[in-house]
């Protein structure tokens, strides 16, 4: 009986494997997205909706990443055939510049409503145009979520004033309780803004200048600053920091607004009070957007995927579960976010149009224009990116120090000497026995 069961399980597994591999490539959609970045059930609902719209079956193969650069390298160097991926602004810029992404062909949508064009926010449109002055990024990519980079802090230990400067990550009061995002560009920008605050105030440089500044001098300055910060850091995290904050394991986290919003909600339910602020010196504003890489093998389903995520009800579901601000500028999205009991009015006309001059929405998600004005978009560094990644390794210490190499070499030499001596003594014992 046991044998029969084993054969049956094997046959079922083989059948499942064969039926997946028997699928035509145009029945498969390979999606590559950030981890923790989509609400439960959305993938399955897309599969059903695609069938309703086109009469064609689709199976989504959903894969995730934590770091922009590792995702890019799979496409740039590995030529992986992902159909649709979700990089951040400066990576979209790089992909545009290097011809790695395809223009969006809306005619592929046939009679399906075009939610992408119907719900574009004027702000997102403008920011996407700023990605590359020569090529309109709106023709190649569609924003998914957006936000700011700032400080998430525990209000029981950190005051708002203390959190309102980037120097909080070097404040000895919070040593051992500081988390830093493991995202080199998102840390480099704010730190450089902090270091250059006097020049910024005097107007000698602009935020935009700093976003392009990959000079040796600036990279070195940021590196030295981060080396000073490092002893107080309890983690360089890609996704786990938000949870650490809700559990009181860290008090200060250099983080994205979406993670902050999620953590603030979770923390409240366990009696921990967190808040988020964009430091006074200025910061970065970022966008993650969908693009279709040139190695895509199913551009039609990829476009449908992007279109589905721009449907207001889907945008609301994703926002409610993930905590990230949707890029969809539909009135339903604004409506879903208004809470007059919880929030004071903010001016969101920049995002939702003139009717949104004073709306009661969480400012962590949709900051007032005054905050946006002190934020800038990151830009691609081209070949200098290597410089940044190498600085990051030096700071985090993943590169072994000279001392580590000396210790390893000493252990190897000692082990080799031990084996050589014991082999020689065995040989001499054997030859003595023979005699
Ligand atoms: N868990 C999903 C996180 C996605 C956040 N993207 C922000 C990128 C900023 N460059």
Image: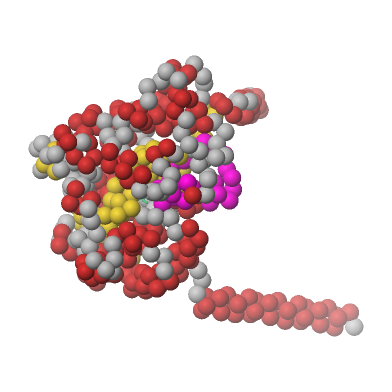
Q: Residue furthest front?
A: 134
Q: Which residues are magenta?
A: 73-96
Quadrant occupied by the C terminus:
bottom right
- Image point (40%, 29%), residue name: 307
Q: At 48% across and 25% down in the image, what residue appears?
A: 108
Residue 293: tell me if it is visible.
yes
**x, y (%) of residue 410?**
60, 80
The percent coordinates of residue 5 (x first, y second) are 61, 26
Q: Quadrant of residue 160?
A: bottom left
In the rendered image, residue 116, in percent from the top left (x then y), is placed at 36, 31
Q: Which of these two is toward me, 136 or 92?
A: 136
Report whether 64 appears left or right of 360. Answer: right
Closest to the observer, 76 or 234: 76
How many marks the image carries: the answer is: 0
Compared with 259, 122 (above or below) is: above
Query: Which quadrant holds the N terminus?
Result: top right
Of residue 23 and residue 357, the one placed in the foreground of this image is 357
């Amino acid at each position: 009986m046991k044998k029969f069961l084993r054969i049956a399980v094997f046959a079922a597994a083989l059948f499942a494997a064969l039926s997946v591999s028997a699928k035509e490539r145009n029945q498969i959609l390979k999606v590559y997205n950030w981890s923790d970045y989509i609400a439960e059930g959305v993938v399955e609902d897309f599969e059903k909706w695609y069938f309703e719209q086109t009469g064609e079956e689709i199976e989504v193969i959903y894969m995730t990443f934590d770091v922009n650069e590792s995702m890019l390298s799979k496409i740039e160097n590995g030529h992986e055939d992902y159909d649709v991926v979700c990089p951040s602004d400066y990576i979209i810029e790089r992909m545009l510049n290097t011809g790695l992404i395809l223009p969006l062909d809306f005619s592929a949508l046939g009679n399906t409503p075009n939610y992408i064009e119907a719900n574009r926010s004027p702000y997102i449109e403008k920011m996407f145009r700023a990605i590359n002055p020569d090529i309109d990024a709106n023709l190649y990519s569609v924003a998914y979520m957006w936000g700011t980079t700032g400080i998430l802090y525990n209000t029981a230990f950190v005051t708002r004033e203390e959190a309102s400067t980037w120097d909080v990550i070097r404040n000895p009061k919070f040593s051992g309780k500081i988390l830093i995002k493991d995202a080199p560009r998102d840390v480099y920008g704010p730190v450089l803004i902090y270091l250059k605050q006097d020049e910024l105030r005097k107007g000698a440089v602009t935020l935009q200048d700093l976003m392009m500044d990959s000079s040796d001098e600036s990279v070195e300055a940021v590196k030295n600053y981060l080396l000073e910060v490092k002893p107080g850091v309890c983690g360089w995290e890609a996704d786990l920091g938000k949870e650490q904050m809700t559990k009181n394991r860290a008090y200060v986290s250099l983080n994205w607004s979406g993670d902050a919003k999620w953590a603030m909600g979770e923390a409240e339910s366990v009696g921990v009070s967190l808040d988020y602020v964009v430091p006074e010196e200025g910061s970065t504003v970022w966008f993650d957007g969908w693009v279709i890489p040139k190695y895509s093998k199913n551009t039609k389903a990829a476009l449908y995927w992007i279109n589905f995520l721009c449907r207001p009800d889907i945008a609301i579901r994703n926002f409610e579960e993930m905590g990230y601000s949707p890029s969809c500028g539909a009135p339903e999205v604004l409506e879903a976010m208004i809470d007059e009991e919880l929030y004071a009015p903010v001016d969101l006309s920049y995002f939702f149009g003139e009717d949104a001059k004073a709306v009661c929405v969480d400012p962590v998600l949709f900051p007032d224009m005054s905050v946006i004005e002190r934020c800038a978009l990151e830009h691609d560094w081209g070949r200098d990116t290597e410089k940044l990644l190498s600085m990051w390794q030096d700071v985090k210490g993943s590169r072994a120090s000279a001392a580590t190499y000396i210790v390893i070499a000493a252990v190897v030499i000692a082990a080799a000497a031990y084996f050589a001596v014991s082999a020689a003594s065995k040989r001499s014992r054997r030859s003595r026995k023979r005699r």
